[in-house]
Image (spheres, helix red, strand yellow):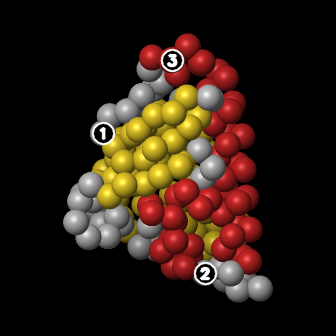
Amino acid sequence: MHVEESVVIDRPPQEVFDYVANRENLPEWSSPVQEVRSETQGPLVEEGARFTTVAKFLGRSFETPFEVIVHDPPHRHTDRSMGGPFPQEYTHIFEEVEGGGTRLTEVTEGEPGGFFRLAGPLLEMAGRRQFRADLETLKDLLEAENS
């Protein structure tokens, strides 16, 4: 499964990066994520930091442990699952656009297993729709903070 979606946010790249890379903010803008639990000391933004998400997707609730594998402010942040329903990796790429805004691209790679393998094409289509909605929520949230 490969899903890639982008949005332009009228905020500087460092500001968008700081908010998105802090995984404790996920429940505020990613509707499937109900909770984020830190599994390591310190901020959840450093390489090697571990956290677990509790999410609900396609009617199923599940927990997925993650590790931060790339933290390159304000350009790139990547988390890789360390278990859960299927292996997945989320990369966020931050690019400055004319006028000082940020193009945020979310790239997700995964290999569905179990129930999610059965969902096949439905999973990718639902994921694409969900990521688009989440990015629009993030845009609205960050742009409203300074209006």
Between 13 and 143, the residue placed more toward the observer is 143
Please tell me which residue is depicted at 45% across the width and 63% down the height of the picture: 24
Q: Is residue 132 left or right of residue 15?
A: right
Between 64 and 112, the residue placed more toward the observer is 64
Q: Is residue 76 left or right of residue 124?
A: left
Kind of residue at disc 3 = Phe
- Which element carries disc 2, helix, strand or loop? loop
- Which element carries disc 3, helix, strand or loop? helix
> Disc number at residue 147?
none
Please tell me which residue is depicted at 48% across the width and 24% down the height of the picture: 112
Q: State which mark lies toward you, 3 or 2.
A: 3
Q: Is residue 64 left or right of residue 13?
A: left
Kind of residue at disc 1 = Met
> Disc number at residue 115?
3
Mark 1 highlights which residue?
A: 82
Mark 2 highlights which residue?
A: 12
Residue 19 in view in this figure = yes
Q: Residue furthest right?
A: 147
Q: Residue furthest top?
A: 118
Query: How far, Cα to Cα, is label 1 from label 3?
Result: 18 Å
Q: State which mark lies toward you, 1 or 3.
A: 3
Q: Crowding near pointer 2: few (<14 within 10 Å), some, many (20+)?
A: some
Residue 124: x %, y % from top left? 63, 30
